[in-house]
Image (tube, helix red, strand yellow):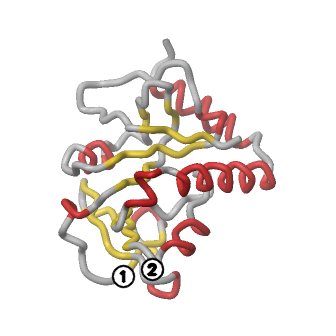
Amino acid sequence: MQTKTELRKLMAAEKRKLSAEQCHAQAESVFSKLEQMVQFKQAKVVATYWSLADEIDTHSFVERWCKSKIILLPIVVGNDLVFRQFTGVQNMQVGAFGILEPVGGEYKQLSDVDLIVVPGVAFDSAGNRMGRGRGFYDRTLSAVNCFKVGVAYNCQHVDCVPTEPTDIAMDAVLFGE
């Protein structure tokens, strides 16, 4: 089995092989599947993320749904993620790690979150997820009780993700086509 470091390097190389058109098509495929899921259709509060250049693009999805659902995006505070409501790109600023983050107060009612969309470096068929290695999402996921959906390019689907006891598995993983 590969180490997490080896797998992170491999995934970065695989993602670099994708063209802009492939990235766009796979993002559309993933979010189309998500939007058909009963868990998403019934959700009133959805936590997701504002994607970085090497992650499956969430921007259209976030902007499409922010008028009809409460869409929460994370910000990094110390070693933790806290969430703020997305109210438009005009209400975002560059935060930790150069990531655009919503301005405004923290959304404290995490018990209201119905579904969380989670990025990852790699996922396996059992729902295991490997992140960037800082544990931000695993700490957050251990504190919320909602449906967890990993989203990724098809090249991020691996046979086996090395896991640790603190790793939180996804309820579903959607890969691009």
What is the x, y in percent for residue 118? 43, 49
Quadrant where the C terminus sits is top right
Residue drawn at x 51%, y 17% is: 2
Q: Nearer the viewer, mark 1 or mark 2?
A: 1
Residue drawn at x 34%, y 44% is: 134
Q: Would you say 133 lies left or right of 63 here?
A: left
Question: Where is mark 2, residue-wise?
Answer: 93
Occupied quadrant, residue 167: top left
What is the x, y in percent for residue 86? 41, 76
What is the x, y in percent for residue 155? 66, 34
Distance, label 1 to label 2, CA atoms, is 7 Å
Give the camera-side residue of 82 and 145: 145
What is the x, y in percent for residue 138? 29, 42
| Image height of 174 relative to 159, above or below | below
The crowd level at tag 1 (other Cα within 10 Å; few <14, some 14-19, many 20+) is: some
| Image height of 43 relative to 39, above or below | below
Give the residue type at disc 2: Gln
User: What residue occupies the far bottom of the structure in this picture?
Assistant: 90
Question: Where is mark 1, residue-wise?
Answer: 103
Tell me, yes or no, whether the two marked residues, 1 and 2, touch with CB atoms within 8 Å: yes
SS state under label 2: strand
SS state under label 1: loop
Q: Would you say 168 lies left or right of 174 here?
A: left
Residue drawn at x 44%, y 42% is: 132
Residue drawn at x 56%, y 66% is: 61
Occupied quadrant, residue 70: bottom left
Give the camera-side residue of 49 and 171: 171
